[in-house]
Image: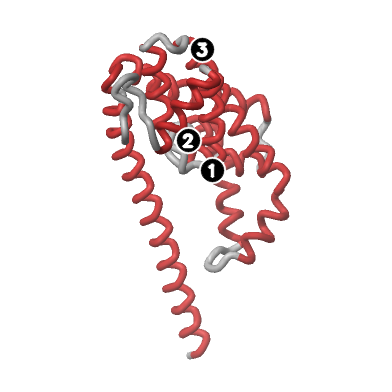
Amino acid sequence: MIINAASQLPAGGVAGWAADLTESLGAVGAGVAIALENLFPPLPSEVILPLAGFAAARGDLSLAAVLWWTTAGSVAGALALYALGALLGRDRMVALAARIPLVKVSDIHRAEAWFARHGTKAVFFGRMIPLFRSMISVPSGIERMRLPLFLALTTAGSALWNALFVLAGYLLGERWHQVTDLAGTYSTAVLAATALAVLGFAVLRLVRAGSGGRRAGG
């Protein structure tokens, strides 16, 4: 990460883009960046949020405004994905699953049953898990979770996550990137665990398919 020595703000990459956005639009820019992060998960909130907190510590932005607009951005991005899920609908989701290799319609039924039992917890705590915080909005829309409940859970979970990183950047000041480095390790661990789970699912499904073929042939 390149740091502008005169301003102590990053000058390149995602952090530089977020810094330019907040300099141009103020706290609203931080909210826009977080909304886009929900829609495009490779954009890391773990960089955007502490950077916005640092900007508030410098006096460039109001801390209260940063907390408000970043949470509003999280909710706006989640709401867009909820709408996508609602438009997709259950029937299209089942039809899509039937075309995906190694995925069965029964997997969708099990996922629906799981969401019916744990959906509220998943939406709240999912806001604190990289990648999952974007993905959870789609099944919420597909299952038509009551919109007031979805908004309340999303707002509460997002406000907690955002405040943690914004305040960390605010308190660390010029060392704001330390929280980004720590969060990067957490994100990497979550993504690695997800990749292993997907790989394990694929291997198990292939093994079962092979065993079923041998039994049928015998």
State the separation of the CA atoms marked 1 and 2.
9 Å
The amino acid type, in three-letter code, at marker 3 is Ala
Q: Which mark is residue 126?
A: 2
Asked if the residues shown at circle 3 and circle 2 are in contact, with their CB atoms under 8 angstroms apart, the answer is no
Asked if the residues shown at circle 1 and circle 2 are in contact, with their CB atoms under 8 angstroms apart, the answer is yes
Tell me which numbered mark, 1 or 2, is placed earlier along the sequence.
2
Which image quarter: residue 35? top right
Q: Residues within 10 Å of mark 2 (few under 14, many from 20)?
A: many
Relative to 188, 36 lies left or right: right
Query: Which residue is drawn at the image coordinates 55% and 63% (left, top)?
Result: 103
Note whether 56 is above or below 118 in the view shown. above
What x and y, as percent, mark residue 37? 51, 36
Note whether 157 is above or below 201 in the view shown. above
Q: Which residue is mark 3?
A: 65
Secondary structure state at the residue bearing disc 2? helix
Q: Which residue is mark 1?
A: 135
